[in-house]
Image (cartoon, rainbow, N blue to C red):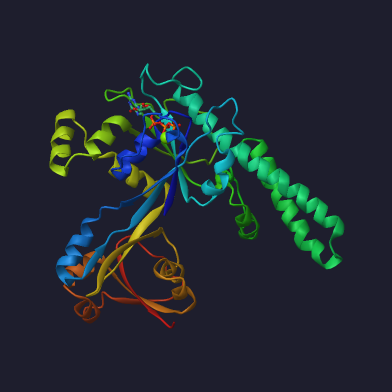
Amino acid sequence: MDIGIIGLPQSGKTTVFNALTRGHADTSGASGSATEMHLGVVKVPDPRLEVLSGMYNPRRVVPAEIKYWDVPGPESLAKSQGIVGQYRNILQGADAFLVVVRAFDNPSVMHPMETIDPGRDVETMLGELTFADLEVMDRAVERLEDGMKKAKPAERPAMTRQLETIRKVKEGLEAGIPLRAQQVTDSESAILINYQLLTGKPIIVVFNTNEDGPEPSLESLELDLPEGDQLGEVCLSARLEAELALMSDEEAEEFRADLGLDDSAMNLVIRASYSTLGLVSFLTVGPDEVRAWSVPRGIPAQQAAGAIHSDFVRGFIRAEVIPYDDLCRCGNIAQGRKEGALRSEGKTYPVKDGDVINFLVNV
Ligand SMILES: Nc1nc2c(ncn2[C@@H]2O[C@H](COP(=O)(O)OP(=O)(O)OP(=O)(O)O)[C@@H](O)[C@H]2O)c(=O)[nH]1
Ligand SMILES: [Mg+2]
């Protein structure tokens, strides 16, 4: 799972990145710091792993991971080719975006548009993503129209279908509807996958607030969002969270209790990522390894096997599945089998959160 952190210049992207990854990336604005890209890996906390590790004594315990990318913005909005600009190919590889939006006051940090206005900034960023996709769709139309002229008759029907799909998505984008809120058929998705449109990816807005609020929300900002567009959202004070992230767990816990904060930025963002992306974790167990894997909710078992190894998709035979709670009750898989809690499932079985799965494969 790769999540790109984007936002206007100086909105606090690198500070959010540090808070999430317990990182030390430079936020001083010293020359060059704003153009560096940072990659950090966050392990998804999951208490079930500890319980399973107690049962299996494995050589390793591996939590699910989320990779966060701190993607630099343009040096200035004035000379930008859009916020996405040169980093488009990096952004294309992300599974979702965190859009950091400045809601903090700090007279020593300039805002590229001078005033603090979180609603405007959310709309600007969403607009930038739409704009970047429109450019891609425009180029695609041009190329296909050109190609049609030279194409052999047998190639034309497929090209016509591509053109129709692209024109339809382009019209939607022009009307301000991101791909994620557009209705597309399976065959249209198969065409669009080649373009990796940015507006097709889930978005989580991170309001970067003062330590003492106020806490904006998408609802309170009364944004004019297209129908069907579901954005995730989180409020946090990135600077405070980045400082807490560098303390020991005990120390940070104490500070949090004093400040009346319930949960770390990392947990808030992981939860928002899971719910916005519709993720669940399935588990694998054995003497070698107890491990959690994050996959989209309801993914067919055969595809879920691909999270472990791409060869497992082709070689999939069936999946032996026991829900985590049943495994804990039975004590081990053999007992689960005896009690009928272990089920044998086929390719299309929709994977649920907490399924402990043994894939039988032929590779
Ligand atoms: N008061 C306050 N200041 C913050 C907060 N978050 C970030 N800042 C300050 O804002 C400045 C910019 O933060 P960065 O994290 O570097 O922002 P950025 O979006 O990565 O900036 P660029 O990469 O240059 O676009 C730094 O001086 C931070 O200390 C916050 O929650 N509160
Ligand atoms: Mg930065």
Name the one closer to the observer, 252 or 326: 252
- The spot of residue 129 in percent (x, y) is 57, 38
- The spot of residue 138 in percent (x, y) is 72, 43
Split into 4 quadrants, where in the image is the C terminus? bottom left
* Residue at horizontal 52 percent and vertical 46 percent from the top: 91
Q: Is residue 314 left or right of residue 251?
A: right
- The spot of residue 235 in percent (x, y) is 34, 32
Report how many numbered discs are placed on residues in the image: 0
* Residue at horizontal 46 percent and vertical 68 percent from the top: 303
Residue 167 showing in the rendered view: no
Split into 4 quadrants, where in the image is the N terminus? bottom left
Name the one closer to the observer, 5 or 263: 5
Q: Is residue 173 left or right of residue 291?
A: right
Q: Quadrant of residue 294?
A: bottom left
* Position above or below: 295 against 330: above
Name the one closer to the observer, 80 or 51: 80
Residue 278 showing in the rendered view: yes
* Position above or below: 48 against 213: below
* Residue at horizontal 14 percent and vertical 38 percent from the top: 251
* Residue at horizontal 35 percent and vertical 39 percent from the top: 25
* Position above or below: 302 against 99: below
- The spot of residue 100 in percent (x, y) is 42, 34
Q: Quadrant of residue 49?
A: bottom left
Q: Quadrant of ligand 2?
A: top left
